[in-house]
Image (spheres, helix red, strand yellow):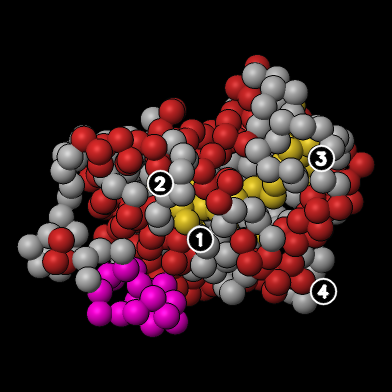
Amino acid sequence: MSKLTEAESARLHPETLALSHGFDPWLSEGAVKPPVFLTSTFAFKCAADGKRFFAWAHGEGTPPPRREQGLIYSRINNPNLEILEDRVAAWEGMKDAYSFSSGMAAIATTLLATHRPGDEMIVCAPVYGGTDSLIHHFLKSFGIAAHFVPAGVHAPARAEPLITARTRSIFIESPANPNNRLTDIGRMKELALHHAPAAPGAVTGRILVIVDNTMAGPVFAQPAKVGADIVLYSATKFIGGHSDVVGGIALANDPVLLAALAQHRALLGGMPNPYTAWLLTRSLETLKIRAEQQQRNAQHVAVFLASHPKVRQVCYLGLLAPADPEYAIYRKQHTGPGSLISFYIRGGEPEAFAFLDHLKVFKLAVSLGSTESLAQHPAAMTHSGLTPDDRCSSGITEDLVRLSIGIENHEDLIWDLRQALDQGEPGRAVPA
Ligand SMILES: Cc1ncc(COP(=O)(O)O)c(C=O)c1O
C-alpha cells in the first residue's frame, strides 16, 4: 500500500505522480518499477468472484471504484493499462482514462461510443489526415454526417448556425495539425450547453466537446479545464516520446462517458498490449523534462526561421503577438507554446522538397513529439488524403513544411535548417 493518503496524493504534481502513482510494489514482490503483466487472463479465487467481476464490468449492481473491480481478461483490464491510465489521468487532472493501441483506435472508439446513425458532428478543420478520413468516409458510411468549419477565432460563429437537433459533438484539434490554428474550446462548450440536443438516442443529453490535444501534449494544455468533455491523444507522440511505440488515450470526467468508453473498447478490442502500456508508462516519467526542452529548442528555431529570407511565414504559438486574434485563446488554453512549428517556404513543392531532402540532422519522417527532430510535407504526406479544396481552405499548401522539434542542441538544429534552406534550390542533387 502507498504510504500517501488520498489527500496527500491529490496535492502532488503530475511529474511526481508519474513515478509511482497507481502501483503498489508490495503486490509485486517489492519491485520498484511495475513488472510487465504479460497475461491474457486472470485467475479468480472462486466462481463467485468471477460472477461478481463480470457483473461489475457490465455495469450491473453498485460496482466499487474501477481499480477494485477485479481483473478478468486483458481486453477488459490489465494492471499495466490501469497504471498508465491512472498516471495520464493525473497529468490531465481528469477522473479517468482508457488506453488504446493507437491514437486512431482512441478516436474511432470514442466516436463510435458517442454517436449513432443519423447523428451529426461539427468538426474544426484541419484535423490530422487519418481523423479527417475517418470522419469524411468511414463515419459517413455509418450515417454520421459532419459539418466542417475552419479552426480559429471565427470557428464558434461559423459553427453555431450549423447546430441542429441531431448535433452530438463538436470535434476540435487545438492547436490544429498541421497549421497550429487555435480554437476557443470554452466558447464551443458554451454553444454546446446552449444547444442541448432535443432528439433522443445520445449517450448523454448534451452536445459533447471532444478535443484531440495531441499537438500540445498534456504538459502545456489541459482542455478539460476549459470545457472539453472528452480529451484524446495519440500517445505515439509526446506521451511515448521516443518514436518507438504506437498508442492512444481517451479521458473523460463523466461516469456515463467513461462507461461508454470502457464498453466500446472491450467490444471493439482496441486496447494496447501490456508491453505497449508499460513503455508508455515509462515514458511518462520523462514527459515534462522532454517537453520543456523541446519547447526551449522550438522557440530558438522559430525565431531563426522567422528571420530567414527563404521563409514566408512561420506558424508557432511562441511567436503569437498580443495583437494576434488567437493570442487570447493561447493565453487561456496554454501554459507554453510547445514544439510544433509549421512554416511556408518561398516557392512551392520543388523548393519544399529540396529543403527536406537537404536536411541532415532532422529526419524526414511523419509523426511528432519525439526526442529527435522530424520534418515532413503535410500536403504530400500526412494530409495527402484530403481533397485539394479542403487542403487549400486549411492552408495546407505545397509550400508548407511541418517541423517537430526534439531535444537536440538547438544550435545544431538551426545549423541544419540554415544549410538546408541555403542549399535547397530545386533541381540540385541530394547529398549522398
Ligand atoms: C493530432 C493527431 N491525432 C491523432 C493521430 C493518430 O495517432 P496514431 O498514429 O497514434 O494512430 C495523429 C497522428 O499523427 C495526430 O497527429
Residue corresponding to mark 3: 197
Q: Nearer the viewer, residue 38 or 368?
A: 38
For marks 3 and 4, give the one nearer the viewer.
Answer: 3
Q: Amino acid at mark 1?
A: Lys
Residue corresponding to mark 1: 95
The image quadrant where one finds the N terminus is: bottom left
Residue corresponding to mark 2: 99
The disc, 3 or 4, on the residue closer to the chain's N-terminal end is 3
Q: Residue at x 63, y 25 (%)?
A: 139
The disc, 4 or 2, on the residue closer to the chain's N-terminal end is 2
**Which image quadrant is residue 288 in?**
bottom left
Secondary structure state at the residue bearing disc 4 = loop
Left of 164 or right of it: where is 89?
A: left
Left of 33 or right of it: where is 185?
A: right
Specify few, some or many for label 2: CA neighbours under 10 Å numbering under 14, 14-19, or 20 or more.
Answer: many
Secondary structure state at the residue bearing disc 3 = loop
Residue corresponding to mark 4: 323
Q: Whole-Å distance between the Cαs marked 3 and 4?
A: 36 Å
**Which image quadrant is residue 2 in?**
bottom left
Q: Nearer the viewer, residue 112 or 65?
A: 65
Mark 3 and 2 residues: CB-CB less than 8 Å, in contact? no
The image quadrant where one finds the C terminus is: top left
The disc, 3 or 1, on the residue closer to the chain's N-terminal end is 1
Q: Amino acid at mark 2?
A: Ser
Q: Whole-Å distance between the Cαs marked 3 and 1?
A: 25 Å
